[in-house]
């Protein structure tokens, strides 16, 4: 057997009432027992029943994994299986099982966030086989233990935030610890398994995962099928509140939409109409509370049939850790934490939206940067317009290629986009080179580093930026899928990019395992409905790659239409004295460092002053997507940020357990591997200098809100 399953199916309200009756019985029994033993002078409080948090609205499913045929970290695949480029097999593609979908989700999410090449570091610096000291001692690295899975919700069934707790068999009840692994991006509940989950499991900590309510929930509108919490499918009407996400469309509205826009999909982050980002901090705190409950369920004393509380809130060493959106959620949780649930924070490349005080300033080498502290809705919609044109600037020549389109098509798109930008008055120039240089300069003026010039093309060509721009504009506008905001939709397309085709195999069958929650994903593409030939893949819908749609998304921000939702997600950088490490790459072209970590440091210095325990490590030659390091041109130019995320976690552990001081804020000057694109030399520690206890001239300073980063 690969697992043992049991489920708690008592409704929360009934469970609380039952628990209260049980506590009364336990207390009465304890009094009688004390009297019988002559200990009436003992004033210790009665045991407290372990009550399921009120926000858990579903049954709790508990599964155990033997660490051989199946496990917590690799789903039985081990280091070797995770390293394979071929996805794990599904016995019947028409009906994948929950176990198969879990295995696929762990495989795809693990690989999505780290460099999986041996020359790049997998199996040597990180991976299931690598121990916490960086040595290859753990074999296949499978980890036995159990998982607790449930939904957090407000009772409506519209939120249904996935909560997952993994408790490794190595967990030491006498020295408990929790590591959060809030999902990055819009990924499902395993979305940070390689970024934070692996380190926590190896440390013997419970890992608290959540998909932040923006996770990989999809609704296939043509068939009315939805995903459940385990990834299996059900008719939306039958699923009811058990659906991970169901679009808010009445029967008549759904039928009308399907007639006009066949084979379209709604996705939770874009179309939940919840603005889920406003709750990402709360969701992370709830994941920790659920982990406390799970640990008490596992290790609390059993009196009769009742588990008692062994770990009171705040009694467990807890590190909030993740990357990107998960990193931003961790910082938000630490700011909101008023009960001591979070001990420390370690995050990489956090996507955060700042409530920026006027005193904050950011400079590099003493020179003010072009712009800083802008929210994602601003810089992402701007980049989505400008990047195809900026890719033609001489400074971007030789950019790594992530385009699936022919070179001639890509060049034509870029040239046409430049022309449309000039015609719209966004940029100036009479020829394509001048226009491209102007587009790139406009990105610089808006906070993008010159270090990321070579990444403007691949960020758009990979569709990372268009996908995020469309998804977040929908989320902030609280748009319904039926709104087709700015004429964009999500749908299956033909080989020529035409939308509305019925796929031979529905992407819904494996969207839980392969999807990332932000189309294009798993065969569902980003469609522009108002193309010259009708609804077509947005890159091919018009000569200028749907510029009208991109301009419309930009106008959603510049018009002020998104202000309310964006204001609801801003953070204040008061971490209440929690020791915190932020790591980010200087060349980040998805979440520019000038809009994230740099101004956050200044804000925190203003908010906490001398009480601040925040260290910020800025890594040169590092960008947002470590998974791209296996691509020719990325391998030669960029180093893995994940290496420094792991170092930061180890530094924080040493600080918490041994009192070792955290190194101060600094620039870490790495050395790219060089060589030929696609054949870069093996990554070694010579490329990856250590985080310095005394950074000297590489120190980053912050005073009165003004941050200065050395060149």
Image (spheres, rainbow, N blue to C red):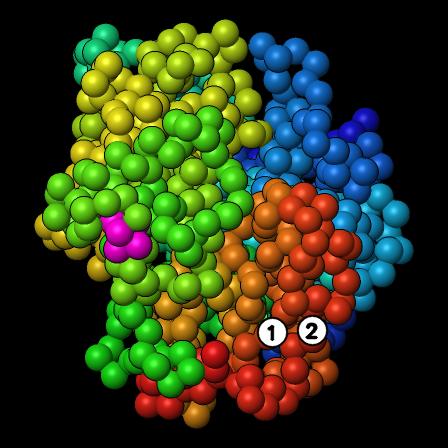
Magenta stretch: dominant secondary structure: helix
The magenta segment is 434-438
Q: Position of residue 605 (x, y in %)?
A: 39, 84
Which residue is rendered at x = 86% and y = 52% of the image? 138
Q: How packed is label 2: few (under 14 Cα within 10 Å), some, or many (20 or more)? A: few
Is residue 436 found inside the magenta-colored segment of the image? yes
Relative height, residue 75 to residue 126 (above, below): above
Residue 187 visible in the displayed image = yes
Q: Position of residue 359 (x, y in %)?
A: 25, 83
Which residue occupies the foreground of this view, 355 or 447?
447
Relative height, residue 618 to residue 49 (above, below): below
Q: Secondary structure at mark 2?
A: loop
Q: Which residue is mark 2?
A: 689
Q: Secondary structure at mark 1?
A: loop
Q: Which residue is mark 1?
A: 669
Q: Position of residue 215 (x, y in %)?
A: 45, 39
Q: Are marks 2 and 1 in contact (CB under 8 Å)?
A: yes
Which residue occupies the foreground of this view, 178 or 626?
626
Q: Position of residue 622 (x, y in %)?
A: 56, 61
Is residue 482 found inside the magenta-colored segment of the image? no
């Amino acid at each position: 057997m690969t697992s043992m399953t049991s489920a708690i199916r008592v409704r929360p309200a009934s469970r609380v009432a039952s628990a209260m009756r049980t506590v009364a019985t336990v207390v009465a029994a304890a009094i009688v027992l004390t009297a019988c033993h002559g200990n009436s002078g003992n004033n210790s409080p009665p045991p407290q029943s372990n009550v399921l948090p009120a926000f858990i609205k579903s049954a709790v499913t508990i599964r155990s994994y033997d660490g051989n045929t199946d496990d917590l970290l690799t789903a039985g695949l081990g280091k070797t299986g995770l390293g394979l480029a071929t996805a794990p097999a599904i016995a019947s593609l028409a009906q994948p099982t929950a176990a198969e979908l879990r295995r696929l989700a762990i495989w795809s999410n693990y690989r999505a966030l780290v460099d999986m090449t041996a020359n790049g570091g997998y199996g040597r610096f990180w991976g299931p086989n690598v121990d916490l000291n960086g040595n290859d001692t753990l074999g296949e690295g499978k980890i036995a233990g159990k998982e607790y899975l449930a939904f957090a919700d407000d009772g409506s069934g519209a939120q249904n935030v996935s909560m997952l707790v993994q408790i490794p068999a190595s967990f030491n009840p006498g020295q408990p610890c929790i590591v959060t692994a809030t999902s990055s991006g819009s990924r499902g509940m395993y979305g940070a398994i390689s970024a934070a989950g692996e380190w926590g499991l190896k440390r013997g900590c419970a890992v608290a995962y959540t998909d932040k309510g923006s996770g990989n929930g999809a609704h296939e509108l043509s068939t009315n099928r939805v995903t459940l919490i385990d990834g299996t499918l059900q008719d939306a009407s039958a699923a009811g509140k058990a659906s991970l996400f169901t679009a808010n469309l009445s029967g008549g509205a759904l039928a009308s939409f399907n007639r006009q826009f066949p084979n379209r999909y709604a996705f939770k982050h874009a179309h939940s109409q919840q603005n889920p980002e406003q709750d990402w901090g709360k969701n992370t705190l709830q994941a920790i509370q659920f982990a406390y409950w799970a640990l008490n369920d596992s290790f609390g004393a059993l009196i009769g049939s009742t588990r008692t509380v062994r770990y009171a809130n705040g009694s467990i060493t807890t590190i909030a850790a993740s990357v990107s959106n998960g990193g931003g959620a961790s910082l938000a949780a630490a700011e909101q934490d008023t009960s001591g649930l979070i001990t420390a924070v370690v995050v990489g490349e956090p996507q955060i939206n700042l409530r920026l005080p006027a005193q904050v300033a950011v400079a590099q080498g003493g020179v003010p940067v072009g712009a800083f502290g802008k929210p994602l809705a601003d810089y992402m919609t701007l980049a989505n317009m400008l990047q195809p044109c900026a890719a033609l600037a001489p400074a971007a020549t030789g950019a790594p290629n992530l385009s699936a389109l022919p070179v001639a098509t890509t060049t034509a798109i870029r040239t046409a986009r430049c022309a449309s930008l000039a015609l719209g008055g966004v940029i100036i120039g009479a020829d394509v080179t001048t226009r491209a240089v102007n587009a790139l300069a406009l990105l610089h003026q808006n906070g993008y580093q010159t270090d990321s010039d070579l990444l403007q093309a691949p960020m758009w060509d990979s569709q990372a930026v268009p996908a995020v721009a469309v998804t977040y504009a929908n989320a902030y506008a609280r748009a319904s899928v039926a709104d087709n905001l700015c004429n964009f939709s999500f749908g299956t397309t033909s080989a020529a990019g035409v939308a509305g085709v019925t796929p031979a195999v529905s992407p819904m069958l494996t969207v839980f395992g392969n999807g990332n929650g932000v189309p294009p994903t798993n065969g569902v593409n980003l469609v522009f409905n108002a193309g010259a030939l009708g609804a077509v893949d947005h890159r091919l819908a018009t000569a200028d790659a749907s510029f009208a749609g991109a301009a419309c998304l930009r106008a959603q921000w510049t018009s002020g239409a998104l202000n309310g939702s964006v204001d609801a997600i801003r953070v204040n950088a008061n971490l209440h004295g929690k020791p915190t490490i932020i790591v980010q790459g200087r060349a980040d072209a998805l979440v520019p460092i000038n809009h994230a970590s740099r101004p956050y440091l200044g804000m925190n210095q203003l908010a906490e002053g001398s009480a601040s325990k925040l260290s910020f490590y800025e890594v040169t030659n590092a960008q947002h997507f470590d998974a791209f390091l296996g691509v020719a041109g990325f391998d030669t130019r960029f180093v893995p940020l994940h290496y420094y995320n792991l170092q930061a976690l180890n530094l924080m552990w040493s600080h918490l357990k041994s009192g070792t001081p955290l190194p101060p804020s600094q620039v870490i000057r790495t050395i790219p591997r060089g060589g030929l694109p696609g054949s870069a030399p093996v990554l070694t520690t010579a490329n990856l200098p250590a985080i310095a206890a005394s950074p000297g001239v590489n120190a980053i300073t912050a005073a009165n809100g003004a941050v200065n980063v050395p060149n």
